[in-house]
Amino acid sequence: MTAISRETFDQVMVPNYAPAAIIPVRGEGVHLWDEQGNEYLDLAAGIAVNAVGHCHPKVVAALDHQASQLWHLSNAYTNKPILALAEKLVNATFAEKVFFANSGGEANEAAFKLARKHAHNHFGAEKNEIIAFVNGFHGRTLFTVSVGGQPKYTEGYEPLPGGITHIEFNNIEQLEDAISERTCAVVLEPIQGEGGILPANADFLTKARELCDRFNAALVFDEVQTGMGRTGDLYAYMGYGVIPDILTTAKALGGGFPMGAMLTTDHFAQSMGIGSHGSTYGGNALAGAVGNAVIDIINTEDVLQGVKQKGILMRDLLQTINDKYQVFDEIRGKGLMIGCGVVEKFQGKAKAFVGAGLQHGIMVLVAGPSTVRLVPSLLITEEEIHEAMARFERAVAQVVKESQ
């Protein structure tokens, strides 16, 4: 077998990704090391997935234990780890029923199907329209990219599923104009992630809840990125005080292990009867064991309050950097979900900060072409935040110097 390198990717992989030149080989907490032994502070966390850091000992122990017991059965049988996780999710949220999948996209696919199925069963086939939002992102299946409001993800895949209307995020007037008796669901992210870390306004979410009640439509919250403590609440809806009918969760739910879930009420769940939807791997015992460990770590007062405090610290340090270099026009977000919108000079060039970051031992992301995204482990320490921001400042300085 030939040596594995970054060039191997170009030789054997479908070219839909463009990974960095480095290949990380080991991780611990917020630290990563590449093949050459270079160390990085990871503020990308696998795109908000590694919420308890890399290789958390309790998660590793849970996986190791379950791996020697039982891996997979299919949903012809159930298993104890997944039932325990479902109970924890029900007890911690508005939900009364849970459906498990393997990813956020699959959880959203289930949510959108449930919304249409429920409307069909209760009100008739003509009640099928979904209202979603420009710059929204809900996954990569044909249905979920169609509900997502970013044409770059749908171009070339036409014809797309119909019955979907996109309006401006946070625009109450447009929502009032768009919703009708034909609407089966309003679908939104409490904080738009891939769209640029754009938080919803509280009055907008309140109005969405009111309008959904008035028109017998499901309010669906995509909390794939905002969920599992990312904003300082277990789920972001809790901080807004607006309760959805259906919620999707993934990413951090498995802490790095592929899993997702759709949460809903008894009333809505009854529309998804036996055989109406399914997933071969969804709800397997390995995922259940890992998910139990992750939620036990995150869903504590200390961790959730810590996310809020650390988010304030990180935004303050980012503002200090920006006061010096004037590269961001806004630093926004909630908890440890932070977006830095770049000034006009760097519009469309946010990736420059990602590349410079790697050169200075710091991993960050973009959220669209003009926003730098920081979504570290929720367990990052204040000391690690200070060190990460020192490295990030050096990266910012480099980008500024190279742009002159």
Image (tube, rainbow, N blue to C red):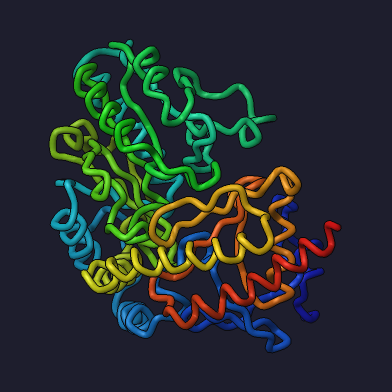
> Which is more toward the observer, 222 or 163?
222
Residue at 84% in and 62% down: 402
Residue at 50% in and 43% down: 139
> Taking 41 as reference, is 344 above or below it?
above
> Which is more toward the observer, 41 or 312?
312
Residue at 48% in and 26% down: 168
Answer left or right for 205 relative to 157: left
> Taking 292 as reference, is 280 above or below it?
above
Answer left or right for 88 relative to 364: left
Percent coordinates x, y for residue 217 in the rendering? 26, 23
Percent coordinates x, y for residue 133 in the rendering? 47, 29
Q: Quadrant of the C terminus?
A: bottom right
> Taking 377 as reference, is 215 above or below it?
above
Residue at 21% in and 43% down: 241
Percent coordinates x, y for residue 309 in the rendering? 35, 68
Answer left or right for 393 relative to 212: right
